[in-house]
Image (cartoon, helix red, strand yellow):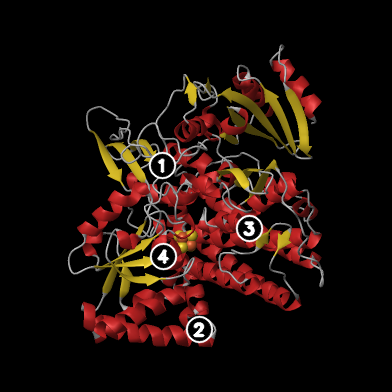
Amino acid sequence: MMHILKNRILKGVVTKHIQSELSEEIETTGLELKSLIQKKFGRSLHIREVDTGSCGACESEIISANNPIYDLQRFGISFVASPRHADALLVTGPVSKNMLIALRKTYEAMPEPKFVITCGDCALDGGLFKGSYYVEGAVKDILLVALHIPGCPPSPLSIIQVLLEFLRKETLR
Amino acid sequence: MDSSELISGIKKKLPDFNALSASQNYPDEICIKVTQQIFKDTCHALYKMFSFPVMMFFALDERKERGRFVINSVFLDFRSAKWFIVSADIPQENPCFDSLAKSMHSASLFEREIREMFGIEPKDSPDLRRLNLHDEVWPFGSYPLRKDFKAAEGGDVRDYKFGRVDGEGVFEVPVGPVHAGIIGPGHFRFSVAGEPIINLELRLGFTHRGVEKLFEGKAYSGAIRLSECISGDSSFAHSLAFTHALEKISGVSIFAQVAYLRGVFLELERMYNHVNDIGGIAIDVGFSFPAAYASIIKEAILQLNEKLSGNRYLKNVNILGGVLADIDEAKKQILLDSLKNLKQDFKELAKMLYSSVSFMDRVDATGVLRRKTAEDLGVVGLAGRASGIPIDLRKHFSWVYKEAKFKIAIQESGDVLARLRIRIFEFEESCRLIEEFVGKLSIDGKIRVSAILKEGSALGYAEGWRGPVLYWLKTDSAGLIERCKIVDPSFHNWQALSYAVLGEIIPDFPLCNKSFDLSYSGNDL
Ligand code: SF4
């Protein structure tokens, strides 16, 4: 317990400890995002992630976006364990044949209104795995995709920024 | 041990043994060719000689050029720091071989893979179920790694049958493929009697993307980029093992500067993953402060990676004959300064965990993998070392590590705590190694030697953070890739999880799972 208290005090709030330009960027991006989410989704946007054959680096960056430095949650975006609780589906990886049914079922399990986001080059069109005998190809050929986050993998900051950009456009519509 | 010593060694176990040929193509690699009839016995003899399971076992389709299939098995003798490859031709009509799996369990998964990918039958095999080509979606009779494969032809598909545990009060808990966390897909089927797990069947293959086929026909530069996307948390180890194979075939020797730089990057990859898992273990027992603390350390390493190499996951660093990222004086300073902070933070993290009685209570004696089980299954790397198997390729093969007086981490108890301790020890050792390597870097050291890829074959390897990453590579006369067999340590180690959880309760499963932290995509390929 002593160690925890000591480290809690010594570390302070890390979200501000990273280089100032970066921290400011996250702050402004995020606060804007928060107010948009408040308006649009009634305070919180819940995302369910599905890996349909990713290498794992996209997952790692999505998890990083939730770490204390980027702390996506403070803006009202959280990742949920069940599709039943989700507003959005975030898909990573080229779609392996083995994941096609699971992807569809996860989407179907989500309540309306719902939308799909793809994350990483693989999910856009198969990426490096395009043309493989076991890859179904682009997620957008299977489900209606509202937004793509490019990168291999996209950095946590670009995940936050692309989400913001999208939500801004959506609210203006 | 050279090839004649090897043959006399085999003869002690198999008096009328005769090799068709034996050759030492590289200082660390000896190939012996035998007939199909004695392939199984030869493999067993090597298994007994080295008391070490098969590390790779795979097939090649050479029907077009030579009218045959070939099967190769790879053994490791860490004492003499050599790899032994046993090879046999398989006629193309009615292709089959005697199954090794009955007396050498570590061959079982490989045989199932050879069967589903090539249609070569392991005779008398105890288990013939397919691994990655799922019965529900892929027709029987289509073999994607055969050279003449074009597209799946419409044979039958069927439902997959899980093993069943019957008995009063036994019930099944199916989990996956989509899990609750932000993580890869796999199916776990638990049979429980009351609270304790009495059986766990793993079904993987959900992220199968057919990568070995994608390598075929590729030029090496594109193929290196592909190797970085096999298992995203081991991008560097994978591209390193792959370039190692390329460099052996090309016959180039890299500059010392490159060896040190690669050492630095390999250890950075180990560090961010180890600290990530330490945090994961903490979160799986609900200990969230250290978990958050660990994720701050991980983020710091990822940012350091980017500063040094231009990429958070160390992609685009390895090339044939060298690396693309040098560490100059300025970067050296950044690296050393960051290391100082990382070491300090990490020490605090370890202290928080070790001093929490309730945390230690959860990890101590949980998820035990016994040494005998680990050996039979062929468990490698970190999980192997936590169960007392003293193998680390860095210790046995690499001169830069020998020079830096690398210390191997070993634990005996095989529980979650042992795997945690290995990680903590290795993280600290990695910091020390990086400092050693950085001290050896010269200001204007060359980081690339030009090389031309020839025709040939070789085994490339690297000790990634999970364990040995192996690439067996064959190139054609145009320098294109003809066959690339990949073995990620996860392939050896997934089965171990279903033994480690026996007798534990389901709520402890995530903890056990995280303590191994195996790759879905590296396993499924
Ligand atoms: S986009 Fe890149 S990082 Fe993401 S899953 Fe695909 S290969 Fe991995």
- At which x and y percent is residue B201? 37, 37
Question: What is the number of the mark on residue B221?
Answer: 3
Residue at point 47%, 53% (across, down)? B360
Q: What residue type is labelled 3?
A: Ser
Q: What residue type is labelled 4?
A: Ser
What whole-number distance in Å separates the C-alpha atoms at marks 1 and 2?
A: 49 Å
Q: In this view, does B293 lie above or below A27?
A: above
Q: Are marks 1 and 4 in contact (CB under 8 Å)?
A: no
Q: Which amino acid does label 1 sit on?
A: Ala
What whole-number distance in Å separates the C-alpha atoms at marks 3 and 4?
A: 43 Å
Q: What element carries label 2?
A: helix
Q: Quadrant of the N terminus of chain B?
A: top right
Query: For mark 2, what is the residue?
Result: A22
Q: Do the residues labelled 1 and 3 touch (CB within 8 Å)?
A: no
Question: What is the number of the mark on residue B151?
Answer: 1
Dot in front, 1 or 4: 1
Q: Is residue A127 above or below residue B64?
A: below
Dot in front, 2 or 4: 2
Query: For mark 4, what is the residue?
Result: B288
Q: Which of marks 3 and 1 precedes in the sequence?
A: 1
Chain letter belonging to callout 4: B
What whole-number distance in Å separates the C-alpha atoms at marks 1 and 3?
A: 27 Å
Dot in front, 1 or 3: 1
